[in-house]
Image (cartoon, helix red, strand yellow):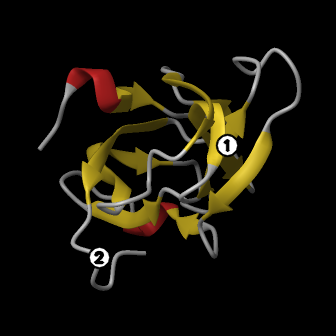
Amino acid sequence: MMDAKNMFSDGQSITASAASETILDTGVADSNLGQGSPLIIRFIIEETFDSAQDSATLTIALQHSATDFGGSAVLLQGADHAISATTLLKGGYLPEIKIPDRHFRYLRLYYTVGTQNFSAGKLTAWIDIGSGEGDS
């Protein structure tokens, strides 16, 4: 179930490394957004990713900050590995990221592009309720 207030990226074009277009404010300095019902970040590919030699990769990290990212960001959790451009196809889903029980007030995603930039590719990412069984 998508909610506009829980969207990190809404069809965001990702051609080079960048933060998600939205920073989510949990409203609490030491938040427990993921406590109770497990919360996860879901991803859907809105436009196929492409690069010159199909060698570009994408790694996604969940970051948090106490100061709206005015200071340094702290990595909470990221993908175990870089995802190859050849698997980033329109309509596909990426592995979910579980939101940890404890984190700072502000949350964002950081998309790291490796090897070479993408010439195309769009992604939507949002917070959803996880099943608690097998969510990444």
Q: Position of residue 105 (x, y in %)?
A: 62, 29
Q: Residue furthest right?
A: 72
Disc assigned to residue 111: none
Residue 78 visible (yes or no): yes
Disc assigned to residue 63: 1
Packing grade of label 1 (10 A; few <14, some 14-19, many >=20) is many
* Residue under the point 39% across and 64% down: 96
For the residue pair 10 and 118, the one nearer the viewer reads as 10
Q: Position of residue 100 (x, y in %)?
A: 55, 59
- Which of the 4 image quarters holds residue 54? bottom right
Q: Position of residue 75 (x, y in %)?
A: 75, 51
Residue 10 vs 81, above or below: the answer is above
Residue 66 vs 46, above or below: the answer is above
In the image, taking residue 101 as reference, residue 4 lies left or right, namely left
- Does dot 1 land on a helix, a strand or a loop? strand
Residue type, label 1: Gln
Quadrant of image for the N terminus: top left
Disc assigned to residue 132: 2
For the residue pair 132 and 127, the one nearer the viewer reads as 132
* Residue under the point 32% across and 85% down: 134
Q: Tally the numbered discs.
A: 2
Residue type, label 2: Gly
- Does dot 2 land on a helix, a strand or a loop? loop
* Residue under the point 63% across and 61% down: 78
In the image, taking residue 77 as reference, residue 120 lies left or right, namely left
Q: Position of residue 53 (x, y in %)?
A: 59, 58
Q: Is there a contact, CB below 8 Å, between mark 2 and mark 1? A: no
Disc 2/disc 1 C-alpha distance (Å):
21 Å
Residue 44 visible (yes or no): no
For the residue pair 66 and 7, the one nearer the viewer reads as 66
